[in-house]
Image: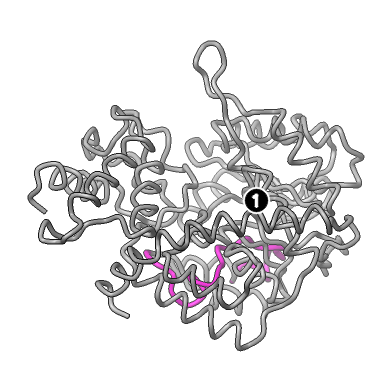
Amino acid sequence: MDRRQFLKAAGAGATTLGVAACKEAASSAGLKESADPGPEAMEMRTNPNSGDRVSILGYGCMRWKMKKDENGRDLVDQDSVNELVDYAIAHGVNYFDTSPVYLQGQSEAAAAKALLRHPREKYMIATKMSNFSNHTREASLAMYRHSFEAFQTDTMDYYLLHSLSGEEEFKQRFIDNGMMDFLLAEREAGRIRNLGFSFHGPVKGFDYMVSLHEQYHWDFVQIQMNYVDWHHAQGRNVDASYLYKELDDRGIPIVIMEPLLGGRLSNVPDPVAVRLKEKAPGKTIASWAFRFCGTYPRVLTALSGMTYMEHLVDNCDTYCHFKPLTQEDLDFLEEMALLIRDFPLIGCTTCNYCMPCPYGIDIPGIFLSYNDAVNSGLVAESVEQSDFKRLKRRYLALYDKSVETIRQADHCISCGQCQPHCPQNIRIPRELARIDGYVEKLKRGTL
């Protein structure tokens, strides 16, 4: 199916799929109310280095809801976090992944407030040295110690060198300032139980970091892995099949980030969604992605940034009734991955590393709005289309609803400050300019 056929099919299937999605949500809710598993049902994996029994579903603490205080400042919705954490622990989730820089620097504190209400043996803390902007020894040590203070603990279960891309960055952030020697000593003293790193970068950088295993004995490594990136990673990212094999060959446990590609694999193009639903009636689209991750035995846990309770409930249901994929299923997902790869989407995972924009532009919101429109067949290709006026109205209305006018793409001045922070290597200013150009052509009727 070529791109034009895909867009045509997407437009035809939008209404049908919308009805199906509503039925799916109602059916799914009923199922979970009547068959709520206990924590003992959660699929668990054993870390061979530490003996930890880790839930295959890990909680990524990067996407919790924010709300405005009386002064207009964004704050984590702590009541929502507490409710989500309580449900997760009650259903066997015991791995919680955070960072000092997530949620405008509020993630560790919010996670700690929720977790400290539970016995320490019920959860494992994973946090990071996110010393991107200031990697002096003094600043790095302060960040490290603050994490321990936030969680009121003497022991960090899993500690990561955050988002490395290769040799030069590793040496700047951890060797030249002596922090790697410090962290190794902390592991030797037992204050770090498992030491690893998360990776975003080219194959050369990954090979270098893995080559250090003989020297540092990585206890785990966090990689981006999902059924699209397995063979079709974009930008500078490396195919997950290669990453997995290299780590598996060395016996290094794997933590997965972006199992849903920032939500894109729970909101796939309509023609793909129809086929996934036909293949597994009664199951959610997202469950395919999580079953893919769990099928690979070296995977210790798959992180999901579950913002809403329905996401958490569904993911717990998938892993409390876990069934690995068959080879036929894997072949089917590869077919779906090829279709998704060829669809004209922007590879944003809404990680928010590009934010805040100094000019107030909502970069992830703009990309998400565009991708949603493409997935739903609402992107016009030409004024000659019979339904051009309808598509124009729908897209512009959704764009204005999703992104405040003052935060839209036309306000980008291409300063480039966002570009170095994108782990997906998206050419952000160029994509914003493309979307702005598309919007202007829609408004003028010159597409």
The mark tally for this picture is 1
- Quadrant for the N terminus in the image: bottom left
Q: Is residue 218 magenta?
A: yes
Residue 165, visible in the rendered structure: no
Q: Quadrant of residue 298?
A: bottom right
- Please give the range of residues in magenta: 211-235
Residue placed most toward the observer, 35 or 141: 35
Image x and y of residue 444, in percent = 9, 43
**Residue underneath mark 1:** 311
Image x and y of residue 409, in percent = 26, 39
Q: Residue at x 37, y 64 (%)?
A: 235
Q: Quadrant of residue 45?
A: bottom right
Residue placed most toward the observer, 129 or 211: 129
Helix, strand, or loop for circle 1? Answer: helix
383 left or right, relative to 278: left
Colour style of the rendered protein structure? one colour
Q: Residue at x 74, y 55 (%)?
A: 30
Q: Is residue 153 magenta?
A: no
Q: Residue at x 24, y 72 (%)?
A: 4
366 left or right, relative to 250: left
